[in-house]
Image (tube, coloured by chain):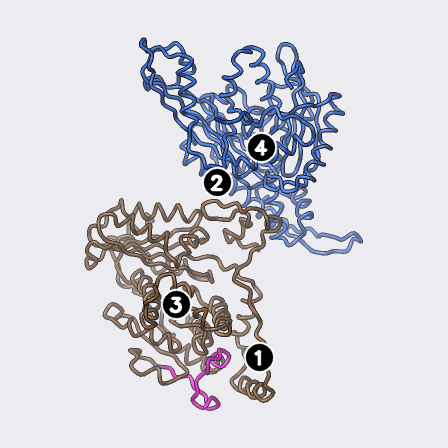
Chain colours: A blue, B brown
Amino acid sequence: MFDDSNIIAGLEIGTSKICVVVGEQNADGALNIIGLGQARSRGVRKGEIINPEQVEEDLRAAMFEAEQMADVEIRSVYLGVSGGHIRGFNNRGVHPVVSADREISAEDVEDVVKNAKAINLPAENTVVHAVRQHFFVDGQDGVMNPVGMLGARLEVDMHVIHGHANRLQNVVRLVRATSLEVDDVVFNGIATALALLSNEQKELGALVIDIGGGTTEYVVYSNGVIRHSGVLAVGGDHVSNDLAYGLKVPLSRAEKLKIEYGSALVTDAAKGQTISLTNELGLELKRINVGHLQRIMSLRLEEIFQLIAQDLERAGLTDYLRAGVFLCGGGSRVPGLVPLAENVFQMNVAPGHAAAISGLTAALEQPEFATAIGLVKFGSLKLRKRAARPGLATNLKEAFGKFFAPRN
Amino acid sequence: MENDLSSSPTPEPAAAPVVRIFGVGNAGIALLGPLATSEFAAAQFAAINTDAGAFAGSPATVKIHLENKLFRGLGSGGDPDRGRALAEEQFSTLKNACEGANVVFILAGLGGGAGSGISPVLAKAAHEAGALVLAFVTLPFDCEGNRREAQAQQGLEQLKAVADGVICLPSQRIFKLIDENTSLLETFRVIGGFLLEGVRGVWQLLTRPGLIQVHFADLCAFLRDRHAENAFAFVEAAGAGRAREVVESILAHPLLDEGHALAESDAVLVSLTAGKDLTMAEIHRVMDQVKRQCGHAQIIMGAAVDTALKDKLCVAIIAARQNVAPTNVTARAETHVAGTAPGVREVMVARTQRSRRGMVKPVQTQLPLTIVSKGRFDKSEPTKHNGEDLDVPTFLRRGVPLN
């Protein structure tokens, strides 16, 4: 499975769309996006599969499109996962250094990392990622690599992202059923942040919000490491559903109205403005107040931001986001979303752009593709590390909490 | 809150509201009895019934006996239509009885003829007389049968449509609080006790000089035109860990649905009362938990010191939820109350005809209260966040009106 191939594919099975992005890594490690595939997703609700057959059909369509465009055969993918069951939290591992000369060895580091990962998860849950944040040597903060330092007590902070094992496995099995290999499973939020944030922004502190069809993922970076992550099983579908309920129109019509007249803030022009819905013969069926439509949308989107803001407040991270907030995902196309988010978060908000990657601008410009691009980037980083330090593959596994390896 | 704090050192007793407490029907009048203590000396009591027998021994100063020759002294006979017809007929009497009051409390047991029939009309009369109307009602036990249940639900809907606030206690819920050996009398005493706590809580809010005062205006703003469905809880604890104990019992309170009622409410009124040793930290601890539970609800808080309580801490909570009941029911209730209700004669005529033909009155079945469709998320796992179902449209949960 890991031949010399330098083709990397990222696959995101979203609630409204299945996205495939194909990247090519050249000899000096630069990444180029060469293919895209997308298909409407019909078998997914709130980021989780409810109809495997339909998902498989849509998945094949998307893969086919991407292969055609990139003119390559995709054998394996980096798979993005999401869903309301995924949680992230920080955990600290402690390890006393026992060697006579008090020098910290690579084994000590391994042990402390293992301790940090030994956490009380519910029996049915499994770790998706366990990312190192910082080491502490005798309480000294911010050590990146403690090997060779002197100390008596080694600690490490890790960010652990975990989810329901069976539900995660369902997606993997489905992808495998289409005779694709899964290189790795990545939490969508991490992939998105990887695509959107530069190293500098991660260092300054940034919040990435990916508003998808069925879920909203958010990830906080600060001081160069991931500090917080979470999923809300609320997304664009909820907006459509609210509109369908509030305006008393069918869901499909609500979806269209959302795209055509939607806004995250109630615009002055919309107040009191009505539009009439007509049937196929041009007869008027119903009049709809655009002000109400935008009001309903605005309340839902505001609530999403408020829930995230509350969560960050509780985690005490609000003051660490000096680079601001970055929005992506299909939901970020709603006009007025940036000012709404600025209102809620009281800081800089910008639409995210997949940075530092070259290739098809069509893909890089679209907010929906950020996650899939991030998955490709994740794969490319992994390949590059493997190429640079072939002997340290085991370390890498630990860094990204290998999901498939049989757990001990 | 700051305003309240700054104004609290100068309590002005001048604007003490006039409170009138009405007991309606047998149950309501029975509830008046325990209320007639020195604590409520400033309140005026009135009893309304269709059956004169219940007035005996009632402390009420005003007794209104609704009667019509046609009923031959049989009272409403457990039929709300008769009760309503009688009340409609003597609407002006009821209105006169409410004249001059700022707040009208209505105590009633729903399900029978008088409570379910008269209360909505009385509430309307009080409203027209310019008073704030608060109804404290019980719903029948499940074992009392479908008919009483349906009558009670209908009465409740009608009452909600006209009263400013309805605090409703389904008797069935009391089963969680009583055990096998509780006698019937004891059970009624418990139910009555809960309602009385409600009345007492509101009463104290209004009359007791508070450190952080809940003004009469606050209560009006809280309840007026909300047509809300209220949940009420009154808890008390004593001793060192009393703040923690109080919070725990609030979160486990059967009348608050183990705290769910708080999460779903859009306005919460909290009143704390304790002895002189009430500390800010305790207030903070209680309010912090309540706030956490309530999410986005508007919170009104009051605190008062009552030396008689010694080391006890009492907390009264009223949680109001915007009424999202099916509008057609409310509308029907409105028109019924508004005067198109069948007059006494029609009711009687209808009755005799029916009994002659031996027909059973078709009773429209009622769906359980407030079903909000979740549309496409109906069958998926609900997205719960602090007890709130995020799949329900935000504008509904926050009660934002669309017009």
Q: Nearer the viewer, residue B381 or A268?
A: B381
Instruction: Verify CB contact (< 8 Å) between mark 3 and mark 2.
Output: no
Mark 3: which amino acid? Phe
Q: Are marks 4 and 2 on the same chain?
A: yes
Residue B361, label in figure: 1
Q: Which residue is mark 3?
A: B136
| Foreground disc of the pair 3, 1 | 1
Judge whether residue B18 can be spotted in this image.
no
Q: Which residues are magenta?
A: B64-84
> What kind of element bears circle 2?
helix
Rounded to the nearest angstrom, the CA distance separating label 1 from label 2 is: 51 Å
Residue A174 picture location, percent across and down: 65, 34
Mark 2: which amino acid? Leu
Q: Are marks 3 and 2 on the same chain?
A: no
Judge whether A153 appears above or below B347 on screen.
Answer: above
Q: Which residue is mark 2?
A: A307
| Foreground disc of the pair 3, 4 | 4
Q: Which residue is mark 4?
A: A81
Residue B231 picture location, percent across and down: 41, 59
Tell me which residue sits at (31%, 83%) in the image.
B56
Residue A18 picture location, percent across and down: 67, 34
Tell me which residue sits at (65%, 20%) in the image.
A8
